[in-house]
Amino acid sequence: MKDEVLFSLSYGMYAIGVKGETRPSACIVNTVFQVTNKPNRIALSMNHNNYSHECIEKTGLFTVSVLSEDTPGTVIGALGFTSGRDADKLANVRHRVLAEGVPVIKENTCCWFLCRVVSRADTDTHTIFIGEILAGSDKSRGVPMTYDYYHKVIKGSAPVNAPTYRPAPRQDEGNDGGAWVCTVCGYLYNDPDVPFEELPADWVCPICGMPKSAFKRK
Ligand code: FE
């Protein structure tokens, strides 16, 4: 079987909130799904190397904020492509810290829920945490962002720790010569109407906010 067949599986886009050693933190994942409804339990797949993984192991708590199609790409950039070990990822992201010390994201998200880990399964690279939902939003707003929407409309990519990470195509695969790629988040700029060279000097990556100098020709 070819790995590409797995691209047919569908996912969403979620911010996972955790209580860190010194401050709340969060990261972006695409693998969250409901596994039972009595009681309501969900599964979350998280790479062993993620700081959020370490925090969930220590506290047994995490939140899920469901991103909407209106959640700015910069929120995904701020939470998805740096480590909470080194930086305050929530510094420029609107959020609320629950009484349990775990944050939920308020940037046009659809809804949120707070989970306590009740079970887990280990793989070589990822842990699948099963969480019981303790609390959450009363209603959901907006259209949930799917992983497909993130790739096709926002033109974002996945960091290497994502369970569904897709390596970038090689240069000889569909390269039209006019595309530039962000070296931080993988965002692909390829607008035939406005060549990259003609973008203003203060233009920044719409996903991670890095300047033009962070881009290289694909
Ligand atoms: Fe970027």
Image: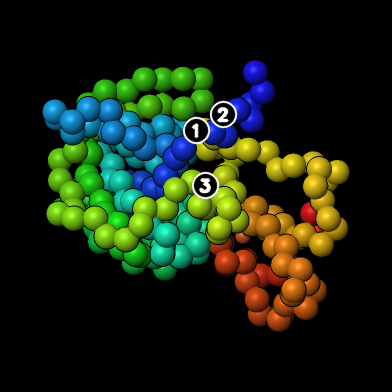
Q: Residue type at mark 1: give it.
A: Leu
Q: 168 or 50, which is in the foreground?
A: 168
Label 1 residue SS: loop
Mark 3–mark 1 Cα distance, whole angstroms, equals 10 Å
Q: Which mark is residue 6?
A: 2
- Callout 2: few (<14), some (14-19), or many (20+) C-alpha neighbours within 10 Å? few
Rendering quarter of residue 166? top right
Where residue 169 appears, as percent x and y from the top left, is 74, 42
Q: Earlier in the sequence, mark 3 or mark 1?
A: 1
- Left/right placement of residue 88 relative to residue 154 reads left
Instruction: Respond yes or no on whether mark 3 lies under 8 Å from ligand 1.
Output: no
Q: Using the rendered image of the protein, determine whether residue 49 is visible from the camera's viewpoint.
A: no
Residue at the (50%, 52%) spot, across then down: 149
Q: Earlier in the sequence, mark 2 or mark 3?
A: 2
Label 3 residue SS: helix
Mark 2–mark 3 Cα distance, whole angstroms, equals 13 Å
Instruction: Respond yes or no on whether mark 1 lies under 8 Å from ligand 1.
Output: no
Label 2 residue SS: helix
Q: 108 or 115, which is in the foreground?
A: 108
Whether residue 52 is situated above or below residue 127 in the rendered picture: below
Q: Residue type at mark 2: give it.
A: Leu
Q: Which residue is mark 3?
A: 148
Q: Using the rendered image of the protein, determine whether residue 37 is visible from the camera's viewpoint.
A: yes
Dividing the image into four quarters, tell me where ligand 1 lies: bottom right
Q: Which residue is mark 1?
A: 9
- Left/right placement of residue 194 relative to residue 54 reads right
Mark 1–mark 2 Cα distance, whole angstroms, equals 6 Å
- Callout 3: few (<14), some (14-19), or many (20+) C-alpha neighbours within 10 Å? some
Residue at the (48%, 56%) spot, across then down: 76
Q: Residue type at mark 3: give it.
A: Asp
Q: Is there a contact, CB below 8 Å, between mark 1 and mark 2? A: yes
